[in-house]
Image (tube, grey):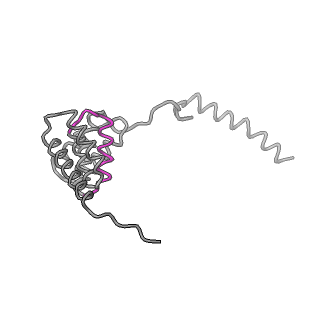
Amino acid sequence: MTFRNSYVGSVPRVISVLLVLCCVAPDRAWPAVNEPAVTAPVDSALCVAAVASGDDEKILAVCSTLIDNEKTERPDRLKALIARAGVYMRKDETDRAIADYDAALRLDPTQAVLFNARGELWRKKGDRPRAVRDFGAAIKLDPQLDVARANYKALAQEIERIGVEMSVKPQPKAPLK
């Protein structure tokens, strides 16, 4: 019985303390639910400076932070993705570079040079159909983009040569049963 009596007596004290907190310091009582989280301001100049310095590790660190920040403006995110994709290309991290070009093309699908760059990566991986599609898309967007036209032509000739070699190569015979 003494336990029950002491428990009942403490409930009004707890409630009164909470009421005092709410009245005296309402901003400290409970965190606001609808307030957005405070994020650091977006500074694209750091990524631009990293690109200008040519330091691949710095580009990866600074531009990745810019890419991951939800408040980054679309043009700044696009530039950061392109810069980071370039680093991944230099490091022979083809899949990561392709992923960055994919993201960049989702932001701006009118960039012929991005289609061409991604096409070069697909070609490097040996995925000729995707490379041809990207080179074709680049040419469709910018018919005067000579590098895309040269890539498309070279790949078409390579595919033609492979087709000729396959047609004259003797086919393996099925084993006799």
Residue stretch in magenta = 92-112
Where on the picture, by quarter, is residue 78? top left
Q: How far across and how far down the image is residue 26, in percent? A: 55, 30
Which residue is more in the foreground, 18 or 91? 91
Which residue is more in the foreground, 151 or 173? 173
Residue at 32 percent across and 53 percent down: it is 95
Q: Residue 168 magenta-drawn?
A: no
Q: How far across and how far down the image is residue 21, in percent? A: 59, 33
Which residue is more in the foreground, 80 or 108? 108
Judge whether residue 57 can be spotted in this image.
no
Where on the picture, by quarter, is residue 145? top left
| Image-based side of 46 in relation to 31, left or right | left
Residue at 31 percent across and 35 percent down: it is 107
Which residue is more in the foreground, 97 or 51? 97
Residue at 22 percent across and 45 percent down: it is 117
Q: How far across and how far down the image is residue 91, in percent? A: 24, 57
